[in-house]
Image: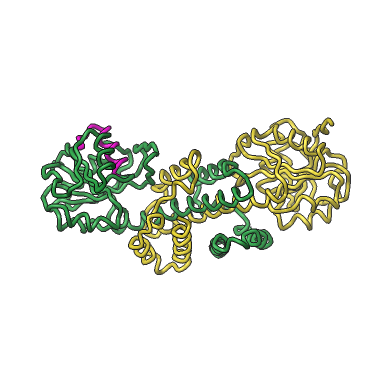
Chain colours: A yellow, B green
Amino acid sequence: MKFHDIKNIVIIGTGNVATHIARALSNAGFTISQVYGRNVREAKRLSDEVNSIFTIDTDNIIPDADLYILAITESAITSVLETIPQHNNLIVHTAGSIHMDVLKAYSENFGVLYPLQTFSKKDVINFSDIPFCIEANSQENLESLINLAKSISDDVREVNSEERKLLHLAAVFACNFPNFLYTIAEDILNKKGIRFDILLPLIKKTTEKIYTLSPGDVQTGPAQRKDQETIRKHMALLENIPEYKEIYRLLSEAIIKNK
Amino acid sequence: MKFHDIKNIVIIGTGNVATHIARALSNAGFTISQVYGRNVREAKRLSDEVNSIFTIDTDNIIPDADLYILAITESAITSVLETIPQHNNLIVHTAGSIHMDVLKAYSENFGVLYPLQTFSKKDVINFSDIPFCIEANSQENLESLINLAKSISDDVREVNSEERKLLHLAAVFACNFPNFLYTIAEDILNKKGIRFDILLPLIKKTTEKIYTLSPGDVQTGPAQRKDQETIRKHMALLENIPEYKEIYRLLSEAIIKNK
C-alpha cells in the first residue's frame, strides 16, 4: 500500500512545539497552508514566518489540507478538538501523555507525531537528531507520518500510546527535574555571589558520561559513598531552605537505597 | 614574594581523584615521587602509571617532597592524617567539604586543591576546562598552588573553605542528583524494553541551553505549566514504585512553588 503523500499542512497552535515544527516542515519544503491560534499576534507571527494565512476562529480552519497538526498544551487538547469541524483528513497531536484515540471522534484518519525534545521559543532547534515517535490508526497513515518525520529527523520510531506515556514520564525525570536542580544549584551559589558557570564543565561531563555508560554505573557523590558526615554537613547548610533540604534528603536516601 | 617551585609530589590515595590528578601532573612534567595507598594492587597500578615508587605504610612516606596531595575520600581524611608524620612541607587535600584547617596540625604549610569535577576511574579527563579551587595558609603557598594548577587547567580560582563547601553542595545538585534522575528514567524505560539512548538528545539540549540562559528561565514540563492532569497521570504510572512517585511529587511541587 502506497502512503498518502502529505503536501499541505495546517498547524493548530502557536506555542513552542507548534513554532518549531511549523518552521522545520516549512524549511523542509512542505506548504503550511494555515496557522490557527487563539491569540492574533501569535498566530500572525507564526503564519508570517512560514508564509501562510492564519485564523483565530476554529470555524475558519480550512477543510482540505492533507494534515492537521494539533500542537497545543496537553490540557487544552480536548477543548480545542471539540471546536474543530469533523473531517476525514489526517489529524495528529504532538503530546506525550495523550492517547491517540482522543482523535478518533474527529477524523477517520489520525495519529501522533511526538518529538522527544524540550522546546523554548527562542532556541535554535536542529531537528535531525530529535527522536520522532510516530503512531497512527492505519498502516497507510503510519507510513505517511513516518515519511513526513523522516524529512526533518534522522531518528523516526514507531511508538504506541503506552510506550509514549512512559517516554514522556522518563523525559520529565531526565530533563525537567535536572533543570530544576540546576536552578537550585544556581540559587545556592548566587546567594553567596558565586556565578553558576563554574558548574558548567561538571554538568557537561556528567551528561557526556552517559553517552557510553549507564547512569547507574557512574553515580558519584556523598550519598553514593554513604558519606553520612558530608551529607550531614550539606543538610546543615540548607537549614534555612527547608524545600531544598527536603529534596537533598529524599534524593540522598534514594541513592543510598538504590546502591 | 616568589612562590616556591613545586617539582616532586607525593600522591596519598589511589582512588578516582588521586588517579586523575597524578596522571595529569605527571603528563604536565611534574615528578610523582611516590604513591601511598592501603591496597597494594591499587598503589602499584597507579605508581606504575606515573613512574613512581609506592608504599602501603604511612611510616614510609618519603619526607622530602615539595608537595603532598591527600586525594582520599572525605570521611577518611582525618584518620589518614593521624598516621602521617608531621613535617613542614606543603600538604593539600582535594576535598569539597573539609575545612583547610584540618591540615594545620600536620604542617606549617597547607592548602586545598579542589577540582570541581566528577571522576570515574575509566574516564578520560581533560583537565584544561576543569575549575580548580585553590586555598592556602599563606600568600607564598597560594601562589605555588595556583602555579601548579595552571599547568594543568585554564580555570584556576582562589576559593575559601566556606565558598568551597557551597560549591560542593551545589555540585551535588548539579551532578550527582541529575545523574540519579537519569538512572530513574533509564529504569522506567528498561522495564518496558525501551532503550535509554532515546533520551540522549533531550538531555544534551537541556544542558546546552544553560550555557547561555539561566536554568530558571528555561524550565519546561508539566509542573512548570501547572498541568495537574499530566502530573496526575504520571503519578499513576508510578503507583507501584513509591520511591520514584515521592521524588516526582516533591520536585513537581517545588517547581510549581518556585514559578
- Rendering coords of residue A23 (x, y %): 68, 38
**Relative side of B68 to A199, left or right:** left
Front in this rendered view, residue A151 or B70: B70
Front in this rendered view, residue B147 or B54: B54
Which residue is at a point 34% across and 38% down the rendered structure image? B127
Above or below, A40 relative to A2? below
**Relative side of B240 to A246, left or right:** right
Q: Is residue B27 magenta?
A: yes
Q: Is residue B108 magenta?
A: no
**Relative side of A7 to B57, left or right:** right
Q: Quadrant of the C terminus of chain B?
A: bottom right
**Relative side of A138 to A178, left or right:** right
Name, please, the residue furthest toward the front.
Answer: B40
Q: Which residues are magenta?
A: B18-32
Front in this rendered view, residue B133 or B38: B38
- Rendering coords of residue B203 (x, y %): 54, 45
Which residue is at a point 19% across and 43% down the rendered structure image? B55
- Name the main secondary structure of what is drawn in magenta: helix
Q: Is residue B17 visible?
A: yes
Q: Quadrant of the N terminus of chain B?
A: top left
Which residue is at a point 38% across and 36% down the rendered structure image? B124
- Rendering coords of residue B141 (x, y %): 17, 47
